[in-house]
Image (cartoon, rainbow, N blue to C red):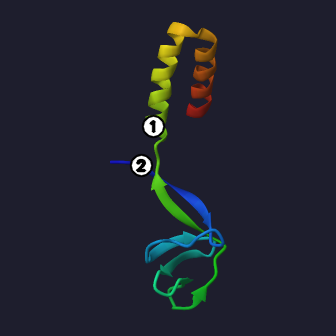
Amino acid sequence: MSKTKYIKVSVSERNPSQTKEYITNMGVLKFSLALNYFFNIDGWQMKPKYWLQEVPDYEDEILAMLEIVCTELYKTDNSLATEVKSLLTKIKQ
């Protein structure tokens, strides 16, 4: 099962591409693609500043690849490998 995370998207930048509920700065609102606006549970049009878009979280895969890169770097460039290892330690904290 893949992990997900949320990114903050400004409404002035773009609206969602699907009709469904989204977490916004005004709480959970439904976005209507046909009407091109957000509305609350009572049907009132709302104008949030941002909404949260669900996106895949590749953090585990990236960390695993950095571990592999670090191992390979120790064979050729110890100083760069040390920097990568330091970065990995910081990320895992």
Local SS, label 2:
loop
- Label 1: few (<14), some or many (≥20) within 10 Å? few
Closer to the camera, 80 or 47?
80
Q: Quadrant of residue 38?
A: bottom right
- Identity of the residue drawn at 46% across and 43% down: 58
Relative height, residue 9 to residue 80 (above, below): below
What's the residue type where badge 1 is placed? Asp
Question: Residue 70, how many percent across, how many down?
Answer: 52, 19
What's the residue type where badge 2 is placed? Lys
Numbered label attached to residue 3: 2
Relative height, residue 10 to residue 75 (above, below): below
Question: Residue 4, how many percent across, how many down?
Answer: 45, 52
Closer to the camera, 32 or 42?
32
Question: Residue 8, how many percent across, how many down?
Answer: 60, 61
Question: Residue 67, how many percent across, how many down?
Answer: 48, 23
Determine contact: label 1, label 2, CB under 8 Å.
yes
Q: Which residue is denoted by mark 1 in the rendering?
A: 60
Q: CA distance from mark 1 to mark 2?
A: 9 Å
